[in-house]
């Protein structure tokens, strides 16, 4: 079965359009950042699995520590950008492991607060060397100055993006 001449022309035009768009996409900074972030997430996930950890649960523990040890599930959900259902499930697992505990929020009996426990703090402290090693491996292709630049650029971009999404901040 042969391809008609007009179909051949349409395919050629489509291929040229794809090539043009491809050149734009290859150099679009947000898309490049998205691909790098996806690769970093997968790398981190593989490193955490080696140590029996889960990224969402560890993110919750890190977040609790960086926010004074206590937060509401709603605030946790917003900050780790996961659904309330996923956060509830993760908190259930953390609570079963005695890494966090639920309790009433001061002044509002309808709301609960999640508090990191001593065991949760110890888990984070014990995971830090592995996380630092994973970070060193992941960034080993960069110079010290590039790592410093990446840190500053990432921080600035993260703050800008979160501020640009008021429904999430």
Image: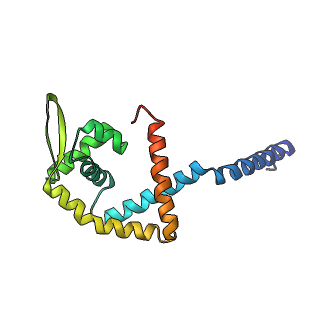
Q: Residue 142, percent across and down?
A: 51, 69
169 vs 17, left or right, is: left
In this rendering, the answer to whether 46 lies above or below 78 is below
Q: Nearer the viewer, residue 38 or 120?
A: 120
- The outermost residue toward the right is 5
Q: How is the image coloured?
A: rainbow
Quadrant containing the C terminus in the rendered view: top left
Residue at position x 17%, y 53% in the image: 99
Residue at position x 29%, y 49% in the image: 63
Q: Quadrant of residue 40?
A: bottom left
Q: Quadrant of residue 75?
A: top left
Residue at position x 47%, y 53% in the image: 154
Q: Residue 69, percent across and down?
A: 20, 48
Residue at position x 37%, y 42% in the image: 81
Q: Residue 48, percent across and down?
A: 33, 62
Looking at the rendered structure, the number of numbered marks drawn on it comes to 0
């Amino acid at each position: 079965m042969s391809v008609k001449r007009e179909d051949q022309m349409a395919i050629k035009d489509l291929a040229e359009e794809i090539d043009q768009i491809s050149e734009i996409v290859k150099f679009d900074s947000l898309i490049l950042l998205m691909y790098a972030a996806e690769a970093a997430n997968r790398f981190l996930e593989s490193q955490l699995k080696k140590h029996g950890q889960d990224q969402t649960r560890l993110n919750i523990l890190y977040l609790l520590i960086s926010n004074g040890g206590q937060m509401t599930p709603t605030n946790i959900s917003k900050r780790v950008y996961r659904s309330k259902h996923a956060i509830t499930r993760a908190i259930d697992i953390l609570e079963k492991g005695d890494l966090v505990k639920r309790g009433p929020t001061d002044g509002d009996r309808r709301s609960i607060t999640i508090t990191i426990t001593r065991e949760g703090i110890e888990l984070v402290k014990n995971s830090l060397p592995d996380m630092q090693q994973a970070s060193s491996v992941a960034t080993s292709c960069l110079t010290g100055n590039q790592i410093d630049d990446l840190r500053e650029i990432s921080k600035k971009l993260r703050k800008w993006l979160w501020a640009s999404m008021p429904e999430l901040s």
